[in-house]
Every structure is written in C-alpha cells, then in structure tokens.
Amino acid sequence: MSSQQCQHNQLYRLCWPRHPLCKMQVQAGLARVTNPSETPIYICALEKCNRLFPSKDRLMAHRKAAHNTDDDGEIITWNE
C-alpha cells in the first residue's frame, strides 16, 4: 500500500471524510463517503475472527463453513 492510500478503506473503498488522505481520494474520485444506510457491514467477532461481510447471510455462511456453528451472536454491525 502506498503512502498516498488511506488505510481506512482497504476492503470497501470507504473513507472517513475528515482524514486528509481520505479527503484527497474522495476529491480524486477514488473513494466515496458513505453512511450506514448505504453500506452494510457485518463483522464476525467469534474467536477474534474479525472478517467483514456485506450481508448477514454471507456472515452466517462464513460461520457455518469456518466456525462450524449457526450461532448468530457476537456480530458487530451498524445496520441493526
């Protein structure tokens, strides 16, 4: 990752509007500012996994495959 790339947007190309490098990327059209209603994010917090998913369905499929469980606890999200 070059020094001109913001580390906030590695997976989803999202930016924090007050971060200087983010502001540069938004102005250049390389990223966009978003909010919870536009960009769902679900994080698997089981066993310190911390993988990000765009939907709860994808997260639950990951849990079944990677953690061998259907447990829907320990999910970090701003969408619910």
Image (cartoon, rainbow, N blue to C red):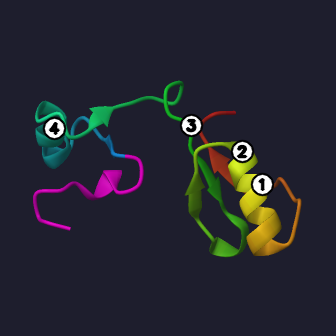
- Asked if residue 60 lies in the magenta stretch, the reply is no
Eye-nearest disc, 3 or 4: 3
Relative placement, left or right, of 54 versus 65 is left
Task: Please tell me whether mark 1 sits on a helix, a strand or a loop.
Answer: helix
Assess whether mark 4 and mark 2 are in contact (beta carbons under 8 angstroms): no
Q: CA distance from mark 2 to mark 1?
A: 6 Å
Assess whether mark 2 and mark 3 are in contact (beta carbons under 8 angstroms): no
Q: CA distance from mark 1 to mark 4?
A: 34 Å
Tally of numbered discs: 4
Residue furthest to the right in view is: 70
Task: Give the labeled residue for mark 4.
Answer: 23
Name the dominant secondary structure of the magenta segment: loop
Q: Quadrant of the C terminus?
A: top right
Q: Nearer the viewer, residue 15 or 12?
A: 12
Q: Earlier in the sequence, mark 3 or mark 4?
A: 4
**Which circle marks residue 40 in the picture?**
3
Q: Amino acid at mark 3?
A: Pro
Q: Amino acid at mark 2?
A: Lys
Task: Give the labeled residue for mark 2.
Answer: 56
